[in-house]
Image (tube, coloured by chain):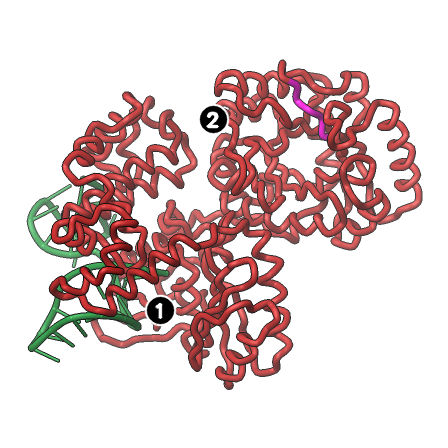
Amino acid sequence: MNNEQVAEVLNDIAEILEIKGESKYRIRAYQQAARSIEFMPEDIEQVYHEGHLDDIPYIGKSIAAKVADVLEHGRSSYLEELEESIPPGIESLLQVPGIGPKTAVRLYQELGIDNIESLRIAAEEHRIQQLRGMGKKTEENILKGIKWLLGKSPRLPLGVAAILVERILEQLRRDPFVRNLVVVGSYRRMKPTVGDIDIMGTSDHPETVIDLFTALPDVDRIMAKGTTKATVLAENGLQIDLRIVPHESLGSLMQHFTGSKEHNVQLREYALSKGFSVSEYGITNIKTGWRIPCTTEEQVYSILELPYIPPEIRQGSGEIGAAVAGKLPMLVAQQDICGDLHTHSIWSDGRSSLEEMALAAEEKGYSYLAVTDHSPGLGIAHGLSVERLRLQWREIDDLNNRLEGITLLKGSEVDIRADGSLDLPDEILKELDIVLGAIHSGMRESSDLITERVIRAMRNPYLNILAHPTGRLIGSREPYDIDMEKVIKAATDLKVILEIDGTPDRLDLDGRHARRAKELNAKIAVSSDAHQVSGLNNMRFGVGTARRGWLEKRDVVNTWELKELQAFLNQHKGK
DNA sequence: GCCGTTTTCGGCCCGACTGTTTTCAGTCG
């Protein structure tokens, strides 16, 4: 069982405890434990086998026993026991906004409602407003909630939302009344998917800005509009909020709305222990009762005597402890990147020529760019035969002679075949500057098979980088059932670099695996996997993911100078 | 149920909104 699955069991337990009306602190304990496991870099099975379960934050004796049960038996007897103690289906009511555990239980007890459909019927028949403490409004809101639930759009990949968000920001920024415009929420934390977008800014004329916002061409529907805040829906269903806030508490508000919720809870708990109460309006000294509104986020953290914690690691997964101990990482940044190590061109399935790609990379300030078109086995992507590959080398040599500021590296994204062999002969691989290996077929193999297959490929002395290691496509394909703990260890031992692919629907490795890779001393390449010039911009999502994984400059090989990188790549050739 | 450089017991983030209430519980972010 992987971390997500164990976390899900704990969350399910918490949900049922809520319905049963248990102490909210007991419920929170399970939720916090679930969070810990979901976000910790280590593999939960591994930690269990080493006997360190209760070293995990928020896991004590009781929850450790339940986690052990889950890992031993693949299911939780405690959860099963709980499920039997409540009527089935009642949890489904919690999905309706406005309905929490208390209401759900009453609806069941007093009206026998245990699914969304019977809830809808009861509301339409006006049976809900007959209940004590519930009225006409409640009933209407339930119907509205059900409608919203059935029509709600799924979370969008970060990079897809980004195109829209940036267009909106650009238009708003043209307005002279707009100041300090910033996107907060999970978008700012670079979470791989976003549910809605929260934009915040200051202005001396808030109403003008709100008017401008709601009149933007990208706005499909105005959901709510006030004097300082508006909510709209874009055409693709994405909900966007804009709020204009007082300048003097911008920092406090940004901190609050950037989250994550868990980070804020932990920060506020920590603040309490230091005698401060933190809210979105400022920081209150509990003894004196004085509240200081913070203009900047830096101020929020510094009053608490903490270094600034970057948004990407505000996940409630150890960052506050690290900050207290002075052990926050110096996160890798976009400007540290010296080159891109995974790109395509019109030679295979890309849409820009080598020269266009090279010039665009130079424009971005890169000093090198690896050309890694597909290998012949990937017919659908016009994979390059050996003959065509050699022709491509000629063009690369020619460009390298002509272009001053950038060096093109001869590379290939080589298919990893079913048996773990690579789709180009070793003699050719040997001549390449850089070799990426990737799986593009047979993705549904069993965990053992696919893990062994990938590790076999990694043993090939010419393989430099394992590209998009888990193969997930956000929203459309689950990751392979691959044992990443083993793959990361193999990467360290065999000096194979693991990739963070910045394509918006990949972001693969994700932050958690990246953090584990760093812990185990594996090296990472952050790449765009661009198929045309504009795709080079996906690097920033890769960098964001690297930052979510606590990676520092030295962990990321494409922050190195070309000479150093080449030395690392070439050391393989003798192994 | 977890946690502790004030604590092994007594705490556990903060505030807004909503609806139905005469003072607040439930829900949400």
Q: Position of residue A551 (x, y in %)?
A: 53, 43
Q: Residue furthest front?
A: A125
A572 and A383: which one is in front? A383
Q: Which chain is red?
A: A
Specify the segment rendered in magenta.
Answer: A413-417
**Same-chain status of marks 1 and 2:** yes
The residue wearing badge 1 is A280
Q: CA distance from mark 1 to mark 2?
A: 39 Å
The quarter holding residue A427 reads: top right
- Tell whether A459 sits left or right of A514: right
Is A415 magenta? The answer is yes
A58 and A147: which one is in front? A147
The residue wearing badge 2 is A485
**Is A140 drawn above or below residue A39 in the view shown?**
below
- Tell whether A391 sits left or right of A529: right
Q: Earlier in the sequence, mark 1 or mark 2?
A: 1
Residue under the image location 24 percent in, 32 percent down: A64
- Res A546 visible: yes
The chain containing the residue under callout 2 comes to A
**Is A49 drawn above or below residue A294 in the view shown?**
above
Q: Name the quarter where the N terminus of chain A is drawn.
A: top left
- Res A29 visible: no
Residue under the image location 61 percent in, 35 percent down: A499
User: Amino acid type of disc 1?
Assistant: Glu
The quarter holding residue A354 reads: top right
User: Amino acid type of disc 2?
Assistant: Glu
